[in-house]
């Protein structure tokens, strides 16, 4: 369209100039002037139109370039937005996976329970130092407690039970470790009694026996090799220690349940009370470690609602990861 307008405008002005010249006469001075002026006008209009069209054409190129740049920037923005969304989703997935892995590593403890445990650590450390000064006579450090052994609050609760009731002389511990040494020291201080320990890991059993030997406590504690096996609890299969052939006490005053670890078997601690119920008389106490874990929470509800040999468990108190139960008679 633009290419047609320029010749049309020039031709129109040329025709107009010819018409004026013919009318006025080409030989008259006025006619010559008019013809010359119109001719100049034709040239000026043509030149102005050409320049205008050149600029319009150049401006069109710039507009197209800007449109292309805008489209490219829009595409880039969408790509970055998509990447950011993917990154956020990936971070969220990784965060959930990390949280789940951390929970599994902590044996099912929630992050809130972990925080509470960390807050209690300074106080428990101070109490253990006091207990160490009172009980430990052999030079050398007592084996560490805490994961994978029982929590410090469990050791403190167990030792406190033995100090509070010296008549509790028959002790069974599920799972060996540093807690075994503390319990043996508490029994030795009381002067009588024995700790029977069930351990399914031969390496752990050997290590605990060596710790007992180093502290001259062999006569106060025995570590029994008890591999895991399937047992039946409430018509369902569970996993617990194989106690067949072991010389365990006929009557148990204190049962410390710190194993098997939830990382080994989720239901490993549930059978402790059902299997040993006939050896736990009224007034006997059970101390459950890792009570903040989901499996232990379910276990505690089971123990307090299902009657075993005419007995139920009553929750006495809890502190940190530790819950203390007492055997009571039903009815």
Image (cartoon, helix red, strand yellow):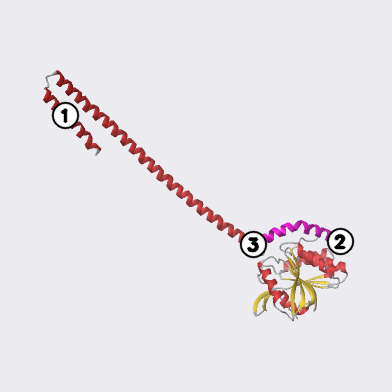
- Distance in Å between CA atoms under marks 1 and 2: 127 Å
Question: Residue 226 appears at what percent x and percent y?
Answer: 73, 73
Question: Please, is residue 38 above or below residue 266 in the view?
Answer: above
The verdict on residue 327 being magenta is: no
Q: Is residue 180 left or right of residue 91?
A: right
Magenta residues? 112-138
- Residue with the mark numbered 3: 103
Q: Earlier in the sequence, mark 1 or mark 2?
A: 1
Query: Which of labels 1 and 3 is toward the front?
Result: 1
- Distance in Å between CA atoms under marks 1 and 3: 96 Å
Q: Callout 1: few (<14), some (14-19), or many (20+) C-alpha neighbours within 10 Å?
A: some
Residue 210 visible to an observer of this rendering: no
Q: Is residue 94 left or right of residue 195?
A: left
Question: Residue 77 appears at what percent x and percent y?
Answer: 46, 47
Q: Which residue is at a point 35% across and 41% down the rendered structure image?
A: 64
- Residue with the mark numbered 2: 134
Classify residue 134 by image quadrant: bottom right
Question: Residue 130 appears at what percent x and percent y?
Answer: 84, 59
Q: Earlier in the sequence, mark 2 or mark 3?
A: 3
Q: Which residue is at a point 34% across and 38% down the rendered structure image?
A: 61
Q: Are marks 2 and 3 in contact (CB under 8 Å)?
A: no
Name the one closer to the observer, 197 or 101.
101
Question: Furthest-top residue in view?
Answer: 29
Q: Earlier in the sequence, mark 1 or mark 3?
A: 1
- Distance in Å between CA atoms under marks 2 and 3: 36 Å
Query: Which of labels 1 and 2 is toward the front?
Result: 1
Mark drawn on residue 16:
1
Name the one closer to the observer, 132 or 59.
59
> Which type of secondary structure does the marked residue at label 3 adopt?
helix
* Dominant secondary-structure state across the stretch colored magenta: helix
């Amino acid at each position: 369209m633009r290419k047609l307008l320029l010749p049309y405008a020039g031709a129109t002005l040329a025709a107009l100039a010819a018409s004026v010249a013919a009318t006025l006469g080409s030989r008259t001075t006025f006619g010559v002037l008019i013809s010359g002026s119109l001719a100049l006008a034709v040239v000026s209009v043509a030149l102005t139109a050409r320049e205008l069209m050149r600029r319009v054409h150049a401006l069109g190129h710039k507009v197209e370039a800007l449109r292309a740049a805008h489209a490219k920037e829009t595409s880039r923005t969408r790509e970055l937005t998509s990447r950011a969304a993917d990154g956020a989703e990936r971070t969220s997935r990784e965060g959930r996976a990390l949280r789940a892995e951390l929970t599994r590593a902590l044996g099912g403890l929630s992050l809130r329970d972990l925080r509470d445990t960390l807050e209690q650590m300074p106080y428990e450390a101070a109490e253990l130092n006091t207990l160490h000064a009172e009980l430990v006579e052999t030079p050398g450090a007592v084996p560490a407690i805490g994961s994978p052994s029982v929590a410090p609050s469990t050791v403190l609760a167990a030792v406190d039970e033995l100090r509070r009731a010296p008549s509790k002389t028959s002790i069974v511990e599920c799972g060996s470790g540093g807690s075994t040494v503390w319990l043996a020291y508490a029994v030795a201080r009381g002067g009588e009694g024995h700790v029977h320990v069930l351990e399914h890991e031969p390496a752990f059993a050997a290590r605990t026996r060596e710790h007992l030997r180093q502290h001259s406590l062999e006569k106060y504690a025995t570590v029994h090799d008890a591999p895991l096996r399937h047992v039946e609890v409430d018509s369902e299969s569970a996993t617990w220690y194989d106690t067949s052939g072991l010389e365990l006490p006929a009557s148990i005053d204190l049962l410390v349940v710190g194993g098997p670890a939830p990382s080994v078997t989720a239901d490993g601690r549930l059978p402790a009370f059902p299997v040993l119920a006939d050896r736990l008389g009224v007034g006997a106490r059970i101390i459950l470690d890792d009570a903040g874990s989901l499996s232990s929470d379910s276990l505690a509800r089971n123990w307090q609602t299902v009657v075993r040999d005419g007995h139920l468990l009553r929750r006495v108190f809890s502190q940190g990861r530790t819950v203390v139960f007492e055997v009571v008679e039903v009815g």
